[in-house]
Image: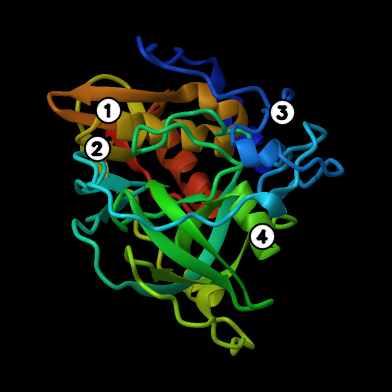
Amino acid sequence: MLLLLPLFLAACGTQAPRPLADRGEPPSAAAPPAPTSALAAKKPAPPVKFGGGYKDDGPGDGPAIDPDTIPDAVPKAEPLHRFANNAYSALGRNYVPLRELKPYQARGMGSWYGRRYHGQKTSSGETYDMYAMTAAHPILPIPSYVRVTNPANNRSVVVRINDRGPFHAGREIDLSWTAAYKLGYVDRGSTPVVVESVLPGQTLAPVPAPTIADDPIAKLAAAEPEPPLPQVQDARGHFLQLGAFGSRDNAEALRLRLARELGDLSGKLVVHSTGTLYRVQLGPWPDAAAAQLAGGRLRESLGMAPVVVQR
């Protein structure tokens, strides 16, 4: 986030965001979490050190683990979550999750998230475990199961969807650290993947041989038009609105997810509630012009599409 610091230094001296009664702070990156999966500690191995897509988001010098001993998720029939599959908006885009299990296949960029979110609540209300075979997806039902394949090396894993995200253009799925390790891309932020739904009792077909020579997804994401930032009148102060949910748990999950990407600005993230709607906002900014400028930089640097809100 160093590229964003010059822009925000002037704004950081403004009024601090209104605290939340149930607001939790992300875990410190200085203390690597212990694996919560019993299998993660079953077979000792040399410490794994990977920075991955987010610097210092891997296990670091933490407990010795062997992620190869952690099995894929096993699809089973589960009731869909009561709230996590409702329509929502995040980073300027609207999402309508699927509310039934059905065949799904897509290609996109797969990213991953690790210890900075480890132990925090996911959109399903479950605790995120970077050593478990789970993933976040914008619209697939929670919970559901998918097979994710890395065409570059023909590796594949089966993971359980229990969280929402990623919300950046061109990104299809956000895997746990262990799942990304098994697919061979924890040493970088993302890689092209193929995502296929796996229904309970379904027999998986063999993974096809790699056919992708020049994946166009990154080019399409880079060419995506950047809409102007709309301005919405709400109440006091100027904020950047990053998401709106009907569930506070989902709003808090997004706030915690964004905290790891915004670095020093994470302290300016708030969840503002009006009636039954919970908005994730960043601010305050001294005026509308400063908020517009900050929103433009977020869009350029992180692919976000915030809305300027005055309240």
| Residue depicted at x 80% and y 37% | 64
The answer to whether any part of residue 65 appears in the image is yes
Residue 181 point in image, percent of width and height: 68, 56
Residue 81 point in image, percent of width and height: 24, 42
Q: Which quadrant: the N terminus?
A: top right
Q: Are marks 2 and 1 in contact (CB under 8 Å)?
A: yes
What separation in Å lies between label 1 and label 4 (alpha carbons)? Answer: 33 Å
**Mark 4: few, some, or many residues within 10 Å (few <14, many ≥20)?**
some
Q: Is residue 118 left or right of residue 276?
A: right
What separation in Å lies between label 2 and label 3 (alpha carbons)? Answer: 31 Å
Report helix, strand or loop for mark 4.
helix
Q: Earlier in the sequence, mark 1 or mark 4?
A: 4
Residue 70 point in image, percent of width and height: 63, 50
Vertical side of 233 occupied by 224: above or below: below
2 or 4: mark nearer the eye: 4
Residue 252 point in image, percent of width and height: 37, 29
Q: Which quadrant: the C terminus?
A: top left
Residue 32, label in figure: 3
- Is 198 in front, or is 82? 198
- Mark 4, residue position: 182
- Mark 2, residue position: 245
| Residue depicted at x 40% and y 74% | 106
